[in-house]
Image (cartoon, grey):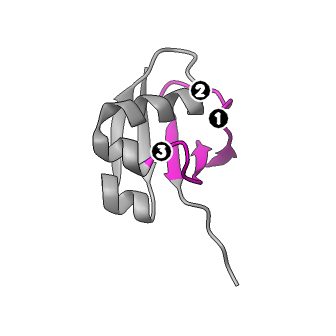
């Protein structure tokens, strides 16, 4: 299945604005992140498991166990603080 991955803030600077990726059916957000990490050294650095990142599936905040459906829009971004 194909999904669209979008990056924001510092991730966008490191990886570009977006990319499409093929995933096995039934994949989760965590599995997608792991697949991206394995895809290149840039991805490994930007999306490393030790980094605090947020994820969203179809514009809803999600965690690693969230299923990613066919055709989903997935977003990764650093946590944001306001004041």
Distance from disc 2 to disc 1, alpha carbons, whole Å, reads 6 Å
In the image, residue 46 above or below residue 83: above
Q: Which residue is mark 3?
A: 48
x and y percent of residue 76 in the render? 51, 50
What residue did someone put label 2 on? 28
Tell me what residue is drawn at x 54 percent, y 52 percent.
51
Q: Are marks 2 and 1 in contact (CB under 8 Å)?
A: yes
Q: Residue furthest bottom?
A: 83
> Which comes before the other along the chain, label 2 or label 1?
2
Q: Quadrant of the C terminus?
A: bottom right
Q: Quadrant of the N terminus?
A: top left
- Image height of 38 relative to 63, above or below: above
Q: Residue at x 51, y 42 (%)?
A: 74
Q: Nearer the viewer, residue 55 or 51?
A: 51
> What main secondary structure does the magenta stretch of the protein show?
loop
Question: Is 51 on the left-hand or right-hand side of 38?
Answer: right
Q: Which residue is mark 1?
A: 64
| Mark found first going from the N terminus, 3 or 1 | 3
Give the secondary structure at mark 3.
Answer: loop
| Span shown in magenta | 47-76
Find the distance from the CA under tag 3 to the CA under tag 1.
14 Å
């Amino acid at each position: 299945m194909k999904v669209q991955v979008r990056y924001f803030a510092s991730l966008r600077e490191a990886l570009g604005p977006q990319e499409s990726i093929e995933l096995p059916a039934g994949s989760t957000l965590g599995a997608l992140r792991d697949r991206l990490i394995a895809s290149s050294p840039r991805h490994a650095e930007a999306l490393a498991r030790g980094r605090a990142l947020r994820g969203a599936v179809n514009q809803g905040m999600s965690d690693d166990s969230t299923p990613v459906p066919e055709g989903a829009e997935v977003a990764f971004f650093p946590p944001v603080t306001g004041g």
